[in-house]
Amino acid sequence: QRIDHIRNFSIIAHIDHGKSTLADRLIQATGGLTDREMTGNAQVLDNMDIERERGITIKAQTVRLAWKGYELNLMDTPGHVDFAYEVSRSLAACEGALLVVDAAQGVEAQTLANVYQSIEHDHEIVPVINKIDLPAADPEGVRQEIEEIIGLDASEAVLASAKTGIGIEEILQAIVDKIPPPKGDAAAPLKAMLVDSWYDPYLGVVILVRVIDGTLKKGAQVKFMAAGTTHLVDRVGCFRPKIEQLSELGPGEIGFITAQIKEVAETRVGDTITDAKRPAAAALPGFKEVQPVVFCGLFPVDANDFEKLRDSLYKLRLNDASFSFETESSAALGFGFRCGFLGLLHLEIIQERLTREYDLDLITTAPSVVYRMHLTHSKNEDAKTIELHNPADMPDPNRIESIEEPWILATIYTPDEYLGGILKLCQDRRGIQKELTYVGSGSHARALLKYELPLNEVVFDFYDRLKSISKGYASFDYEQIGHREGDLVKMSILVNEEPVDALSMIVHRGTAEARGRGMCERLKELIPRHLFKIPIQAAIGGKVIARETISAMRKDVTAKCYGGDATRKRKLLEKQKKGKARMREYGNVSIPQEAFIAALRMG
Ligand code: GTP
């Protein structure tokens, strides 16, 4: 393939603006799939159940299209901030992007975040206004929005409907005309970027690569520069979207290799692949290890499921090296795992796969971010800095000199009418306003807000609140901007004077009281009465900041239960016995495990 006949591009869009539908259309129009294969409800690029159901793309995949003598590599990028590094790597593998905007919805927060990233990678951007078949479509208004808000020339934006097929040929033509071909030197030593990898039960680990210079051949010995490992390439190919094996990939091309690798953890996104015998002088810039930023405990509701949970976590990790886990035990919840994720969506996806694909009933503890604690020296130890993501491991408060927490820069895009509520929400969550811009007018008036927020306040139901305040209309995106010092404390929850480990959390002193009160009120509803009064308290250090009391049960309530015939009585006893097994004792208080689960599920 001549390099000037190659085009590498991705599609950027806000969720639901039609990225997957358009990708499928392009595949169909270029003959990659028959009409019959298309009519299956599966979207071709999203291959996991959950992705399909939620309509989000998790793992990047690439499809090679053949059109009028050109080789078009369409790279599907994950659209969510949790996978920001993967997005960035896939963008680095392309020279251009289709910017898909819904003709009825207009520009949204993720459109903006993604398009700026694309601009940073020097992409040529081809605007596509999709869904023009909708009665509510306003292509002219959206064209103006693209120009006003993003600052792109949209005069030649393609008007399209991925659903009905309008504009598909024009899009293909625009890709060829506007997006530049890749550059690369076929004679130079091999240099290829590891864009993505995943586990396939038949092929083992499949690696998606973009060749920069040189040629990647089947049978070659290659070196992964960051990992420092050497492998024999046993397959080279591309997806159309069906697998097609090739003998080699030349400069500028995107395709896959396999190299008898067993685990995804052995491959690192962003690594440079070179020839083992004739290596490139320098690796590609920008390689970085991804680190989990949100942690929580996962416990099986049924203690007998512990082994099953462990096996399932191992299996999931085969395909996702970015999440971590280690065993953890809790007095309240028994044995489980402390797990790390790239973000909240990542957490939800893993949790959902465990529940659905592995049929596990799980309890999730409140998510925590990674705190940096600066400790003074003690009798046995020097001063040092530690990273902490489990409130249970909080060091002695007397040794803590300062605590830093991660902050984010959030971009919120909302119809004007919900602005007041959203400003208040951000303010309540310790937000610092950085920008407030109005765009458009009349029924289409929107506000673009930028806030710096502590991630700690965002992992705690921020997204749900934002959605409910704006009736689902506000869109939200964020990037991490580093750690900052904060007045943070560990809040414990005590039931009958005893701390419940699974419920303790690290909070800002200013919001501790409200959070503590909320948790106490909730537990009061959830814990059944006993024959005596039970205090429920939230405390910082030794100081109680919120308190509720469960009043004692009156005797006649029990008397009533034990009337009736013998079988009913036996059933009741059976039930009680079962219930007992799942009770946890706090002092002399028995708390049904359901109460913890409910307390945690309510956030
Ligand atoms: P994510 O994967 O969640 O980012 O969404 P997406 O951008 O891939 O959107 P997707 O292709 O799943 O489309 C979202 C919805 O819009 C689906 O119900 C599509 O059927 C519908 N849709 C896509 N394109 C068009 C179009 O041109 N016209 C109409 N009327 N509906 C469309």
Image: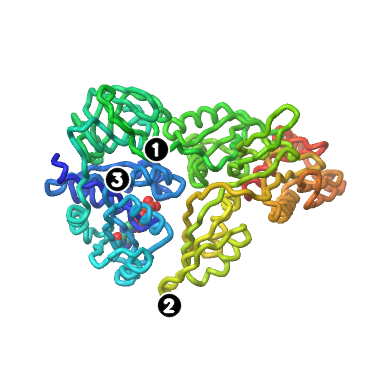
Q: CA distance from mark 1 to mark 3?
A: 20 Å
**CA neighbours of label 2 inside 10 A, class few (<14), some (14 to 19), many (20+):** few
Q: CA distance from mark 2 to mark 1?
A: 46 Å
Left or right: residue 556 compared with residue 59: right
User: Where is residue 555 shown, x and y percent of the image?
Assistant: 87, 46
The residue lying toward the viewer, choosing from 27 and 459, is 459
Residue 385, compared with residue 544, is above or below; it is above
Q: Which residue is mark 2?
A: 442
Mark 3 burial class by Cα count in 10 Å: few <14, some 14-19, many 20+: many
Q: Earlier in the sequence, mark 1 or mark 3?
A: 3
* Label number found at residue 450: none
Q: Residue at x 38, y 66 (%)?
A: 149
Left or right, 214 with reference to 57 = left
Q: Residue at x 84, y 44 (%)?
A: 559
Mark 1 beta carbon near ligand 1 (under 8 Å): no
Across and down, in percent, residue 332 comes to 70, 36
Three-letter code, disc 1: Phe
Q: Which residue is labeled 1 in the image?
A: 287
* 5 with respect to 294 (left or right): left
User: Which residue in the protein does label 3 denote?
Assistant: 75
Q: Do the numbered discs 2 and 3 sit on residues whose CB atoms are within 8 Å?
A: no
Using the rendered view, name the quadrant where residue 368 is placed.
top right
Please, which colouring scheme is shown? rainbow
